[in-house]
């Protein structure tokens, strides 16, 4: 990589995290982003927009960050409030600054296996499987959830060509009848449905590996906040039934943040040296 100004000391990468309002379901992820950025030497900018911000103003703010040369990476926290167009906002970003990899250009390039950035959550799932030496190639994988930010891109990555892909992928979703029948014969199940307790031993094939991407908040009077985070998997039911289950919290989430940091550094390098 050649820096545009070889004699200058490069500034550290800067990640801007944009969200509308505060206290939403993204808050936990936002805190982890800020803490991890500080730990690894990435500058972090929390861009909080007031409640009631509409699509037009959000797009204006995102475009300003995209044009700011001091900002190397932009992430839009979602879900956004009802009526605010996430797709319209994220597509205001250039592909190299779209470090969550969910803009239309990056998603389209996943099909050609040439994405500038792939979604951090999807890459986190692959990293976890790789870390535990769980092969994907020639295996059957079921993905529950078809969002353009997690389920669909993950399906494309897993079904693509390569040693860390080549899976036979089934996509299930909220309108899939008889979910348990769709999961029969699958070696790996990735759930990003956001439905607490969706997966138990009545649904999951015995011996399957469950990667739980779901994150929901459920009431819990034993906690100071009165609620706690939970995933899609019923860990108690799956104990001794599934081969492995990732925990929530503490499973995919921290790896997603780490992968996001890798995407930020990649974006910083691209902007230092120009797109290939």
Image (spheres, rainbow, N blue to C red):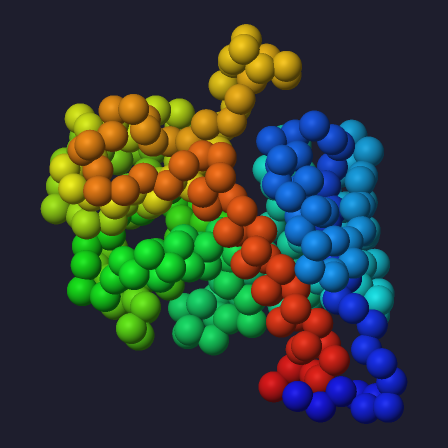
Place of residue 69 in the rendered image (x, y in percent of width and height, measured from the top left): 83, 70
Q: Nearer the viewer, residue 203 or 63?
A: 203
Query: Seen from this angle, which residue lies furthest top?
Result: 221
In this orientation, does residue 5 appear?
yes
Q: Nearer the viewer, residue 12 or 78?
A: 12
Q: Is residue 129 left or right of residue 6?
A: left
In this orientation, does residue 198 appear?
no
Place of residue 263 in the rendered image (x, y in percent of width and height, measured from the top left): 60, 64
Place of residue 251 in the rendered image (x, y in percent of width and height, measured from the top left): 45, 42
Q: Quadrant of residue 6?
A: bottom right
| Residue 110 vertical placement versus 33 (above, below) | below
Q: Is residue 111 left or right of residue 40?
A: left
Q: Quadrant of residue 62?
A: bottom right
Q: Is residue 139 left or right of residue 120?
A: left
Q: Quadrant of residue 137?
A: bottom left
Q: Nearer the viewer, residue 151 or 40?
A: 40
Residue at (65, 30) in percent of width and height: 24
Residue at (17, 26) in percent of width and height: 202
What quarter of the picture does the C terminus occupy? bottom right
Residue at (39, 54) in percent of width and height: 128
| Residue 17 vertical placement versus 259 (above, below) | above
């Amino acid at each position: 990589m050649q820096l545009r100004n070889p004699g200058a000391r490069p500034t550290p990468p800067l990640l801007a995290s944009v969200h509308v309002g505060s206290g939403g379901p993204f808050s936990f992820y936002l805190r982890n982003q800020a803490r991890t950025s500080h730990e690894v030497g990435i500058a972090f900018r929390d861009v909080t927009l007031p409640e009631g911000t509409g699509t037009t103003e959000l797009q204006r703010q995102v475009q300003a960050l995209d044009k700011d040369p001091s900002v190397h990476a932009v992430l839009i926290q979602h879900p956004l409030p009802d009526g605010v167009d996430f797709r319209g906002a994220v597509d205001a970003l250039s592909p190299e600054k779209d470090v969550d990899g969910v803009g239309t250009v990056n998603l389209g390039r996943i099909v050609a296996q040439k994405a500038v950035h792939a979604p951090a959550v999807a890459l986190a799932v692959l990293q976890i499987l790789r870390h535990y030496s769980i092969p994907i190639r020639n295996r059957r994988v079921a993905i529950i959830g078809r969002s353009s930010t997690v389920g669909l891109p993950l399906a494309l990555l897993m079904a693509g060509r390569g040693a860390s892909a080549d899976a036979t992928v089934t996509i299930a979703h909220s309108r899939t009848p008889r979910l348990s029948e769709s999961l029969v014969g699958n070696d790996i199940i990735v759930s990003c449905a956001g439905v607490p307790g969706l997966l138990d031993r009545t649904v999951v094939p015995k011996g399957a590996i469950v990667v739980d991407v779901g994150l929901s908040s459920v009431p819990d009077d034993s906690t100071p906040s009165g609620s706690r985070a939970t995933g899609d998997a019923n860990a108690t039911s799956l104990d001794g039934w599934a081969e492995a289950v990732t925990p929530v919290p503490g499973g995919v989430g921290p790896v997603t943040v780490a992968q996001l940091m890798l995407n930020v550094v990649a974006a910083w390098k691209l902007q230092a040296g120009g797109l290939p």
